[in-house]
Amino acid sequence: MSDEPTRPAPAGDTPAGKAEAKPAGEPVAKQVDEAWKKQAQEEKKKAAERALEEEAREVLPPASFTSFVGSLGMQAMLALGVMENPITKKTETDLDQAQYTIDLLEVLKQKTRGNLTKEEEEALTSLLFQLKMAFVQAAK
């Protein structure tokens, strides 16, 4: 026998829970609690999902005329195939839907004439011009 100190193994490693002495140079075996590990992973996943949901809520702009017009413009761009559909991950063209959305924006422009700020009017006019040009290109 040597004079090296011995390290007891964690309880439960030996029959009847008796600790067995191990030489100091031997590594101690790790015990992994799989149930705890799984629970910790699930909690981490849920926390990440909550963070994404909170981030998505923060990304939404405040409700305004400009954001409303912008969302209609995005719908028209999707229908014109200018942008990839975020749900299907495909670029799709639906000229009837695009024309309808452009027409809605024209009605909105006519009905709000004289009631918009200079910036709102310029944004709507510019958006309509861009959409009409994209429509002509898509219809070729």
Image: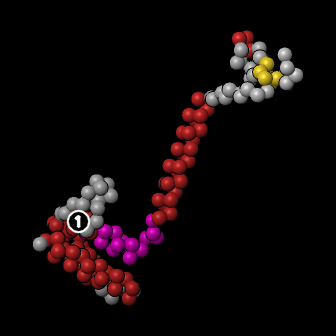
- Given residues 120 and 27, the one toward you in this image is 27
Indicate yes or no whether the magenta region holds residue 61.
yes
Residue drawn where x is 73% and y is 26% of the image: 26
Identity, as a three-letter code, of the amino acid under mark 1: Gly
Indicate yes or no whether the magenta region holds residue 116.
no
Instruction: Give the magenta part as a residue range.
Output: 60-76
Residue 31 position, x and y percent, is 66, 27
Quick check: 11 above or below 120? above
Residue 107 seen by the camera: no
Residue drawn where x is 24% and y is 76% of the image: 131
Coloration of the structure image:
secondary structure
Residue drawn where x is 77% and y is 14% of the image: 18
- Quarter in which the C terminus is drawn: bottom left
Which residue, as the protein is rendered here, is positioned at the far right?
3
Residue 118 position, x and y percent, is 38, 88
Which residue, as the protein is rendered here, is positioned at the far top?
16
